[in-house]
Amino acid sequence: MKQSYDVAVVGGGVVGCAIASALVRQSLRVVLLEAAADVGAGTSKANTAIWHTGFDAKPATLEAKLVARGHQLLEERASDFGWPLERTGALLVAWDDEQLLRLESIIANAQATGYTRIEVKSKSEVYELEPNLGPGAHGGLLVPDEGLLDPWSIVIALATDFVVNGGTLLRKAGVTKAARIEGRHELQTAAGTVYATWVINAAGLNSDVVDRLLGHDGFTITPRRGQLIVFDKLARSLVKHVILPVPTATTKGVLVAPTIYGNVLLGPTAEDLTDKTATNTTAEALAGLLDKGRAIMPRLIDEEVTATYSGLRAASEHGDYCYEVFPDKYVRVGGIRSTGISSSLAIAEQVIADLGERGVKMQELKSPTTVTMPNLAESRPRPYQDAALIAADPAYGRILCLCERVTLGEVRDALTSPVPAGDIDGLRRRTRALAGRCQGFHCGALITEMATAWSGHTHA
Ligand SMILES: Cc1cc2nc3c(=O)[nH]c(=O)nc-3n(C[C@H](O)[C@H](O)[C@H](O)COP(=O)(O)OP(=O)(O)OC[C@H]3O[C@@H](n4cnc5c(N)ncnc54)[C@H](O)[C@@H]3O)c2cc1C
């Protein structure tokens, strides 16, 4: 296969999918190259899923600007895509006098980033807002615009938007070599050779490796692991806000947060590693999280644990995103470490603006095909609750995954959509099947069998 495109985007995480979707809506010929069997299988699937405002970002950085803008863009596009967002607010809690004193500097930081809606809360107000907090809170800050997002549906929606509007998505197409020949980039991938005028590197943890393949050497990624514990849905009523600690210089610290899927998270850790594949959890770190969680919210620790997981932040030696546009028609979008879901649409907007400034001819699609995602949020009706939908198509009334109430209709849709699940994990991210308390013990075999049966027909 030898194909020529205006732009090749390397990496189908949230950042690459957002950029690819924005480019294809500008009538460009775009290929999205993803190494894994599915989009969104890297860091974009394993994070804390907070809809960040950027109040705690370092002022005057690109990250601060793009997270603030991305927060707004996600909301603007949420109804089109059917993305659930929950503006729960974040409650940042000071647990001693020293932390209480530091709240002033957090407010000053937020104002310097342009975020001005922080409210100071006394000790009693903190407990009114979060009655299940452990003893010892001294006071806090309420950040009303922080909230929860659905990281899985955001990536899949953007990838689908890309494909239905004419983009070429190649999965299992990791870029292994690159050269510049007669003013074009030649990319060797596991799925063949691709030519493109521009290359955009959104390869996440491997963005430094891809940077070097393209003849640059601007940064090194150090995977910073964050381990998390997922508590059962019965714990959801204990927590109303995203509960944040006072951050330190190196980490935002351990939080307790609800998820859009109806669980409660405790984590993440922050461990600098060398292995970019080390997404395992460790007994020691999980024990440490439980200790911290016991202090923040003792009642939470009595609840049942559904799962544990970890994600790797693409941290670099620079204190900001590694973003640059080069004269050899290369855009580096690396080191998008702990805020990239929130900033993704703004990163894409930045890329469009920068390519436009460099003379890339673009024309916005007049009537793009729109995509609406099936709802995975617990706060909105799901298909099994929709009598009219079930009457029209009984497959939505047949529950396969009892824990998460996922129906045959949803599994079928995920396997036959324009970007069908590339593997069982991709099916989980499209439906929530296998993500519940039994972790697939009940329905895993049946769903795997269905996925295998469908895959021959549907997968590109
Ligand atoms: C513990 C933790 C908590 C976080 N919490 C939040 C949060 O609350 N809110 C928030 O907004 N953000 C959060 N983040 C950050 C967010 O998850 C990331 O910033 C975002 O997912 C990065 O997206 P990406 O597309 O850059 O990377 P990825 O999702 O990793 O995508 C990169 C893709 O590139 C592919 N790839 C790699 N090499 C190649 C190659 N050679 N060829 C082709 N493809 C390649 C990979 O397979 C991968 O799919 C958190 C991250 C972690 C780890």
Image (cartoon, helix red, strand yellow):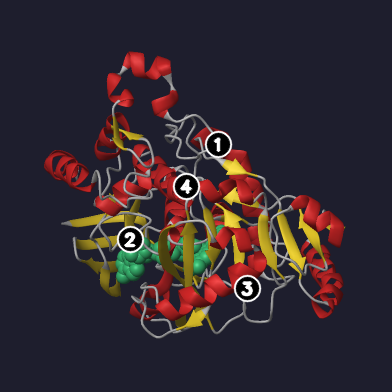
Q: Give the label, 3 or 4, closer to the camera.
A: 3
Q: Give the label, 2 or 1, closer to the camera.
A: 1
Q: Secondary structure at mark 2?
A: strand
Q: Position of residue 279 (x, y in %)?
A: 37, 72
The residue under the point 13% across, 38% down is 457
Q: Which residue is mark 2?
A: 196
Q: Secondary structure at mark 1?
A: loop
Q: Secondary structure at mark 4?
A: helix
Q: Position of residue 255 (x, y in %)?
A: 61, 65
Q: Give the label, 1 or 4, closer to the camera.
A: 1
The residue under the point 54% across, 40% down is 84
- How far is disc 3 from disc 1 in space, using C-alphas? 27 Å
Q: Position of residue 46 (x, y in %)?
A: 44, 61
Q: Which residue is mark 3?
A: 253
For label 2, being within 8 Å of ligand 1 is answered no
- How far is disc 2 from disc 1 in space, using C-alphas? 43 Å
Nearer-the-camera pick, 196 or 275: 275
Location of residue 177 by image quarter: bottom left
What amino acid does circle 3 point to? Gly
Q: Of the residues under marks 3 and 4, which one precedes in the sequence?
A: 4
Q: Which residue is mark 1?
A: 379
- How far is disc 1 from disc 4 in space, using C-alphas? 17 Å
Q: Of the residues under marks 2 and 1, which one precedes in the sequence?
A: 2
Does 62 sit left or right of 331 as displayed? right
Q: Which residue is mark 4?
A: 154
